[in-house]
Every structure is written in structure tokens, then in C-alpha cells.
Amino acid sequence: MTTPTFPAALDPLPLVAILRGLTPAEAPAIGAALFDAGFRLLEVPLNSPQPLRSIEALARAFPDAIVGAGTVRTAQEVRLVHGAGGRVIVSPHFDPEVVAAAVGLGIASLPGIATPSEAFAALAAGASGLKLFPAEMIPPAAVKAMRAVLPPEALLLPVGGITPLTMAAYRAVGANGFGIGSALYSPGKDAAAVAAAARAFADAWAGTMRA
């Protein structure tokens, strides 16, 4: 099975599952709960326990998904994630060296940005999309203003404090998707609870699409 491209993985459900704190032992069951709910983008932050092992396990178990890492801060970390089977690099900040390393390896890069200057610089460096972070500091009105000046094809994904109830306002002003963290998964949350949360987010996205 061929791993889909990043844009193709966004198509059915443009939500990135941020699995901070995931352990390798949990990875198959949590991944299955998310995959069954329609998630095709799975991110294991590098400040999780043994993150590269979890990325390997998820990439092996779910070849139809794009698995990658979050909290990626250096080009060396990009290379380690790629070696573990990661296909998307998510950062809390914009570093041109991190984006260049991902681009050089042919994998997606989603740097964190909070201003138009950072957004334009990240796109010029080759970013696949923009992680609007932290979303608590970038309300829908700010996303609307950015969308008015950024290239229409630029992918905007708010991350930080997103819940099913806050998605519609961002979608209405041009957000292309979201990164979902603790409201979806947190350490100790079992697969059944993650599945229920995943369905709530998937339903909320479908609702925003119908609005």
C-alpha cells in the first residue's frame, strides 16, 4: 500500500491527532481507534516517551495514514523522524533549517507561526502548511485577516485548545483543518475514550462542512 501524500490525507478528515505522551505499547490500540474514526494524520510529539518507537509502530500498522512527529526543533530530529518512518514534521515554531531538512527528504513540514511575517517566510521556505499556534492567541478574526493576504492555496491549521465547539468559527474564516491535542488524547486515556472523542471531532468537522 502506498502512503498517501499530505494533501490527500487531509481530504477525508483534515484533523491531525496530537498524541503527546503516547507510549509504544499504547500506539496500536490508540492508532486503531483514531483510524477507525477517520483520522489519517497521526502526530507523536518528540517529548513523549520513546517517540520514535511509537512512530515506527504507527507507521507500520497504518500504512494508509501519514504518521509523523511534533515538537520537532532541529534538522537532526527531522532526520531521526524520517528514519523511523515519519512523513510529516510539525514544529511549535518556524525554523528554515527544519523546513529545509523536511523538504530535502520529501516529507511534509508544518511549522508553527503566529504572524503574517512568519507565515510568508515559512511558505517561501517550502512549508507544506502552516500550524497557527497557539490558537488561543490567534482567534478566528486573526485567521480571517491572514487568509485575506496569504496565497489561497496555503493550508492553515489552528492548533492549541481546539474543541468540537470552537471548530466552526475557525472553519468559517478559512481554516483548512486543525491539530487536536489533549481534548482527543492524553496519557492514561484508553482507546474507547479516544474513539469517542475522535468521533465527536469528526462529527464537528462534518457539521462545519455542512454549515
Image (cartoon, grey):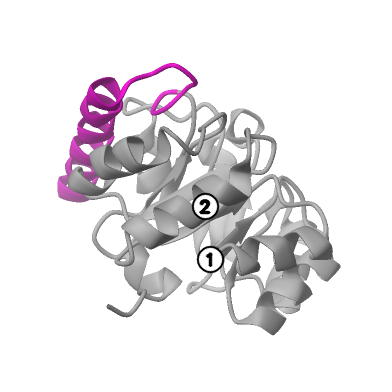
Callout 2, which amino acid?
Answer: Ile
Label 1 crowd (10 A; few <14 / some 14-19 / many >=20): some
Is residue 176 something that shows in the picture?
no
In the rendered image, the vertical position of residue 26 relative to residue 54, given as above or below: above
Instruction: State the residue lying farthest toward the front.
Output: 25
In the rendered image, the vertical position of residue 71 relative to residue 84, given as above or below: above
Location of mark 2 (residue): 55
Q: Are marks 1 and 2 in contact (CB under 8 Å)?
A: yes
Q: Nearer the viewer, residue 73 or 151?
A: 73
Residue displayed at 81% across by 65% down = 75
Q: Which residues are magenta?
A: 183-211
Per the image, label 2 sits on a secondary structure element best described as: helix
192 part of magenta stretch: yes
Q: Position of residue 198 (x, y in %)?
A: 27, 34
Q: Nearer the viewer, residue 67 or 24?
A: 24
Quadrant of the image for the C terminus?
Answer: top left
Instruction: Mark 1 or mark 2: name the one nearer the start of the chain.
Output: 2
Residue displayed at 65% across by 70% down = 127
Q: CA–CA distance between discs 1 and 2?
A: 7 Å
Callout 1, which amino acid?
Answer: Gly
Location of mark 1 (residue): 85
Q: Position of residue 63 (x, y in %)?
A: 33, 66
Q: Main secondary structure of the magenta part?
A: helix
Q: Position of residue 147 (x, y in %)?
A: 54, 59
Number of marks present in the image shown: 2
168 horizontally vs 199: left or right: right
Q: Position of residue 154 (x, y in %)?
A: 53, 69
